[in-house]
Image (cartoon, helix red, strand yellow):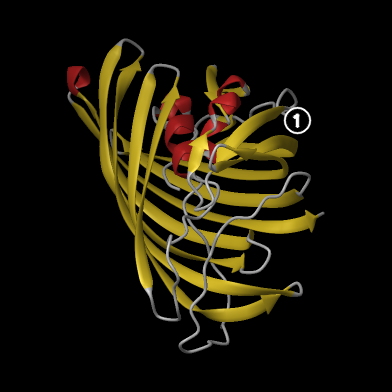
Amino acid sequence: MTKNSITRRSVLAAAVILALAAAVPAASTPQAKPGAAVVLEYKMPAGRSLTYQNKSEQAQIMEVQGQAMDTQVANTSTVTFKSKGPKDQNLLLGVTIDDITASVTNSMQGDMSPDMAAVKGKSFDMVLSPLGAEVDVTGAEAITFSVAGESQSVASEFKTYFPDLPGKPVKVGDTWPSTTTVDEKNGPISIQVTLQNVNTLEGFETVDGMECAKVSTTFTGTVAGSGNQMGMDLAISGTTKGTGSWHFAVKDGILVKSASDSTSELTIDVTAAGMSIPMTQTVKGEVKLTAKS
């Protein structure tokens, strides 16, 4: 994911950070099964419960009138998905944010860490397709926290939570494309991130007793946004790219772990002030299944 940055006074802050934070996945050396085709599909029978631990680290550097501004962000969360059974052709999941922390430090403004207490323990319903499309996460929009005085929803974290599956049998070496688009609004700033992913089935290996397909991913994307800060109109543009991989338990039909690494190059144009602010952002993220029942 994936475009995210938290530094309201740095303009793009929360909107860019949380939007890109989700992105893709990573792992190890698979033991390939040449010629063996598999069908990958999420399976969430009613009552199944999956708990994931998520970690991400983000670094953002902006240059404003010749002065560098550095922002460091570290997020951790524990989230439980419990199946409520099918919803039409999709899966209805009850999502609970068991725990969440966020640390934000800016070289000019110091500690800007938000208070996440109001988010802990909150729940919402989510609709997931068997191929990994997050059909509906609108219930998460109402779960918010404040960053530098601006309200930010947790919804963006769940809009790209699960990797997209191919929708056809695949064997080692096969590739398939997927597209991810995330619209994020943070106060007066709106951002859209569009990612073009290329996924490759690298092979198979056992993780925590489950036979998993290992998939590598490369992605490129664009970032576009606009808004108003301190009475001045802003235009945001840029590109992002990265790599990742993920492990999917073939028989169980569940995501086991993922990791991703991305870099974004952005420009914030403030026409009224005659300013063009360059920004570089790097994001490392990982998701790991910690419990299932």
Label 1 Cα crowd, 10 Å radius (few <14 / some 14-19 / many 20+): some
Residue 210, given in percent of the width and then of the height, sits at: 71, 72
Q: Residue at x 59, y 55 (%)?
A: 42
Residue 158, given in percent of the width and then of the height, sits at: 56, 39
Task: Please tell me whether residue 217 is drawn above or below residue 273 in the rendered image.
Answer: below
Residue situated in front as seen by the camera: 195 or 9: 195
| Quadrant housing the C terminus | bottom right
Residue situated in front as seen by the camera: 90 or 141: 90
Q: Residue furthest front?
A: 88
Whether residue 81 sits left or right of residue 130 in the image: it is right
Q: Residue at x 48, y 52 (%)?
A: 283
- Residue 133 visible within the image: yes
Task: Please tell me whether residue 36 is drawn above or below residue 129 in the rendered image.
Answer: below
Give the SS element for disc 1: loop
Residue at image mark 1: 120
Task: Please tell me whether residue 133 is drawn above or below residue 205 in the rendered image.
Answer: above
- Residue 148 visible within the image: no
Whether residue 227 sits left or right of residue 100 in the image: it is left
> What is the quadrant of residue 254 in the picture?
bottom right
Q: Residue at x 73, y 35 (%)?
A: 96
Q: Residue furthest right?
A: 293
Whether residue 281 sits left or right of residue 214 in the image: it is left
Residue situated in front as seen by the camera: 209 or 262: 209
Task: Please tell me whether residue 204 is drawn above or below residue 53 in the rendered image.
Answer: below
Residue type for callout 1: Lys
Q: Residue furthest top?
A: 231
